Amino acid sequence: MLSKLKALLSASGPSPEVSPEERLQLATCVLLTEAALADEEFSAAERDHIADTLATRYGLPAEEAHDLIDEAMDARKRSNDLWHFTNQINQICTMEEKHRIIEETWRVIYADGTLDAHEDFLVHKVSRLFNMTHGMLIDAKLRVLEEMRGA
């Protein structure tokens, strides 16, 4: 899978051998790692949370989830913005699926127990790129905070 993703990243357009599911995995991982890096710290708790999320959401083995994180970080370094990744998600996902990705983004942000202004800006930006309303964004945030309080 990683060789296909590398081919996708090096090509100017989508490669036919890379499935929509693989493009979705990479795009989602890029957004989650971007959220983790927004406060300029990528804690072990954030990395583990992202790997667990990828493993659960996409049925990836732990090692493959960690490799995907590395690929996502490389992909983001080579990209000028997040539009390419959110566009991939917009093409593949329903609004409900995008809502779940925003919830996962909030979970990554709160993995270290704090909300930084850069993290808040990022999740607002991503939600706009997903064509979500502010109410949907806040609903996702409140659901995650309630989950965390109950845990």
Image (cartoon, grey):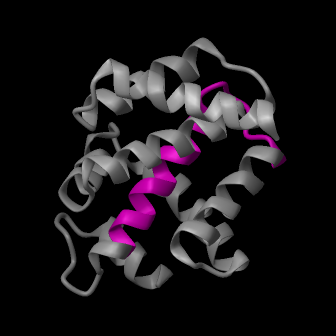
Please tell me which residue is depicted at 21% across the width and 77% down the height of the picture.
Answer: 15
Q: Vertical placement of 51 versus 102: above or below?
A: below
> Percent x, y for residue 104?
55, 45
Quarter of the image for residue 130 reads: top left
How many numbered circles are shown? 0
State yes or no: residue 69 in magenta.
no
On whether residue 42 falls in the magenta region, the answer is: yes
Residue 77 shows in the view? no
User: Is the magenta region chiefly helix, strand or loop?
Assistant: helix
Quick one: 13 or 31, which is closer to the camera? 31
Quick one: quadrant of the C terminus?
top right
Question: Taking the image as drawn, is residue 76 in sight?
Answer: yes
Residue 13's x, y, as percent?
16, 66
User: Going 53% across and 64% down the picture, which residue do you hit?
Assistant: 71
Between 3 and 97, which is closer to the camera in this rendering? 97
Q: Is residue 149 left or right of residue 99?
A: right
The stretch in magenta equals 22-44
From the viewer's perspective, tell me whether residue 82 is left or right of residue 141. left
- In the figure, is residue 18 to the left or right of 5? left
Against 139, residue 63 (above or below) is below
- Quadrant of residue 36 within the rendered picture: top right
Taking depth in this image into account, of 113 and 70 the one nearest to the observer is 113
| Image coords of residue 85 (percent x, y) | 32, 50
State the image coordinates of residue 107 (x, y, percent, origin top left). 64, 39
Q: Quadrant of residue 61?
A: bottom right
Which residue is rendered at x = 23% and y = 62% of the image? 92
Residue at the image position 22 percent from the left and 49 percent from the top: 87
Asked if 43 appears above or below 68 in the picture, the reply is above
